[in-house]
Each structure stands twice: as C-alpha cells, then as structure tokens.
Image (cartoon, rainbow, N blue to C red):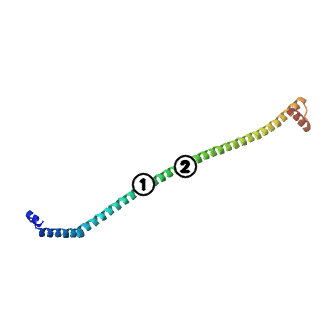
Amino acid sequence: MSELLSKLGIDWKLLIAQIVNFLVLLFVLYKFAYGPILAMLEKRQKKIEKGLKDAEEAHKKLEESEEKQKGVLKHVRTEAKDIVEKARVQAEKGKSEIAAEAKAQAEKIITGAKAEIAREKEKTIGEIKSEIGGLVAMAAEKIIGEKMDEEKDNKLIEESLK
C-alpha cells in the first residue's frame, strides 16, 4: 500500500503527520473555540427564550389589566346609572311630596276660609235678625200706634223670624 501511495505522490509519513496535526487542531478548536461558542450560543438562546416568556407574561398581564379596566368601567357605569336613577326617583318623590304638601295647605286654607265664611255668615245673619227685629218692632209700633214693652217686642220678633 505504501507503493500505491508513493506512486500517487503521497508521502505516508507526511500524511500521518498531517492527520495528527488535523486531530490536534480539531481538539484545540473544540476545546477553546467550539466549546465557548456553543456555550455562548446556548446562553443567548436561553436569554431569548426568557425574553419571549417575559414578553408573553407581560402580554397576558396587559390583557388581564384591560379586562379588569373594562370590568371597573362597567361597574362604574352601572353605579352611575344607579345614582342617576336614585336621584330621579328622589326628585319624583320630592316632587310628589311637595305637591301633596301644597294640596294639604290648599285644603287647610280652603277649610279655614269656609269656616271663616260660616262665622261671618252666622254673624251677618245674627246682625240681620237683630235689625229685622228692630224694624219689625218699629213697624208694629207704627201699625199698633203704641210702644210695646220689651217682653212683647221679643215675643213679636221671635214669631216674625219663625
């Protein structure tokens, strides 16, 4: 085989030395270059994976925050509607209370006015009766021609009024 190699122009000693040199170079490259490069690439890959994981978690937190915000806004809107509705109901209640109070005051004034009218009517009727009694007594005096005493006047007035 050595003859075959020498005919091809290959020196087997030189070939073995080149193979040994190649293996030494391969070992040195693996030890000092390939190993650190692989470690650096692995570190970088872990860093990238961590960054992606953190970004995904941040995205999830953002979505959760947005959902919470939507829930809070919905709750606030519901509360606002409730407050407005309560205010409207309170206003209606106040309005009806004021109307009822005004009606009660009007009734009270009307009742007072009717009572006052009744008193005035009784007073006026009493005054009219008294004046009519006096007029009847004067008319009777003129007709009869004599002055009647107090007892006869009262009796005549009572009969006239009846």
Q: For mark 1, does the 10 Å Cα neighbourhood hold few (<14), some (14 to 19), or many (20 or more) residues?
A: few
* Residue at which label 1 appears: 63
What residue does disc 2 label?
Answer: 82
Instruction: Decide if residue 72 is on the left or right side of residue 111.
Output: left
Q: Crowding near pointer 2: few (<14 within 10 Å), some, many (20+)? A: few
Measure the alpha-carbon separation of dots 1 and 2: 28 Å
- Residue type at mark 1? Glu
**Residue at left 30%, top 64%?**
42
- Give how far across and how far down residue 113 sits, in percent: 72, 41
Task: Looking at the picture, tell me which residue is in the foreground, 53 or 137.
Answer: 53
In this rendering, is residue 122 above or below 7?
A: above
On the image, the x and y values in percent for residue 136 come to 85, 32
Residue at screen point 19% across, 70% down: 24
Q: Name the residue rendered at 52%, 49% in the picture.
A: 78
Q: Nearer the viewer, residue 32 or 149?
A: 32
Sequence-first tag of 1 and 2 = 1
Quadrant holding the N terminus:
bottom left
Q: Which image quarter: residue 139? A: top right
Q: Is residue 30 left or right of residue 103?
A: left
Q: Given the image, on which type of amino acid does mark 2 rest?
A: Asp
